[in-house]
Amino acid sequence: MRVLVVEDERNLCDAIARGLRRKGMAVDVAYDGPTGHEMAYVTRYDVVVLDRDLPGMHGDEICAALVASGALTRVLMLTASGTVADRVEGLQLGADDYLPKPFAFDELVARVQALGRRATPAAPPVLTVGDLMLDQTRRVVTRGGTPIDLTNKEFGVLEELLKARGGVVSSEELLERVWDANTDPFTTTVRVTVMTLRKKVGDPPLIETVVGAGYRVPEPVVVTPAGGSA
């Protein structure tokens, strides 16, 4: 999941980012309104955690611009004011959720995860291909019932490949969805991560390389009782 945190209180912004990264999310940060607006326009984020009172450009303007763009990005608005009127106003602007400060970090994580599931085409919480199972909520992967220990990036790559449901996912798409803005776009990290992921997932191999296009996990062919394939 790709998340942008726009918050002018740097210590709070960095703390939120660190905590979300520990939950396996790819997180970028912006400390003012104009920077946050530009980043949200250039990159497709699943969720933007948006402080309402920002210098340079108000959070309301950023939220309205995201809604007007038609992006699937979900907005979790933060504010120091927790009155009912403020919450209603924030939601009427197009925010998907609203969290007053101070907040419990566990609640923030739960809300971001819930919004992230709504930011992409619906996918079941548990993804399966053959005997491989990936539980997006519990962040557990098993094959043939045996747990597989994956890093956050390996989990993210496998998750994106399974969500594609047999489609090809390019290295560029994986880099955008699983890594953050500080990653060198010319890095070989995607190829290396896929290589180690293949080893951990084991045999028979599930991840295919489509030369010049990217990677995919083909969906198994279902054989009908009559001997045909569906």
Image (cartoon, rainbow, N blue to C red):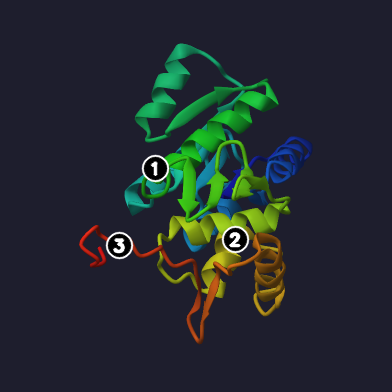
Q: CA distance from mark 1 to mark 2?
A: 31 Å
Disc 3 marks a residue whose amino acid type is Val
Q: Nearest to the eye among marks 3 and 1: give it.
A: 3
**Residue at 35 percent of width and 28 percent of height:** 92
Q: Nearest to the eye among marks 3 and 2: give it.
A: 3
Query: Which residue was labeled with disc 2?
Result: 157
Query: Which residue was labeled with disc 3?
Result: 223
Local SS, label 2 = helix
Horizontal side of 37 relative to 187 (left or right) equals left
> If you read the primary sequence from the N terminus, does the residue marked by circle 3 or circle 2 appear first?
2
Q: CA distance from mark 3 to mark 2?
A: 29 Å
- Furthest-bottom residue in view? 212
Query: Which residue was labeled with disc 1?
Result: 64
Local SS, label 3 = loop
| The quadrant where residue 78 appears | top right
**Residue 205 visible in the snapshot:** yes
**Residue at 20 percent of width and 62 percent of height:** 226
> If you read the primary sequence from the N terminus, does the residue marked by circle 3 or circle 1 appear first?
1
Q: Nearest to the eye among marks 1 and 2: give it.
A: 2
Disc 2 marks a residue whose amino acid type is Val
Q: Position of residue 193 (x, y in %)?
A: 69, 68
Q: CA distance from mark 3 to mark 1?
A: 49 Å
Compared to residue 169, the image places residue 53 above or below, namely above
**Residue at 71 percent of width and 73 percent of height:** 192
Q: Nearer the viewer, residue 167 or 144?
A: 144
Local SS, label 1 = helix
Q: Residues within 10 Å of mark 1 (few under 14, many from 20)?
A: some
Give the numbered dot on residue 164. none
Q: Nearer the viewer, residue 225 or 134?
A: 225
Quarter of the image with the C terminus is bottom left
Q: Nearer the viewer, residue 69 or 214?
A: 214
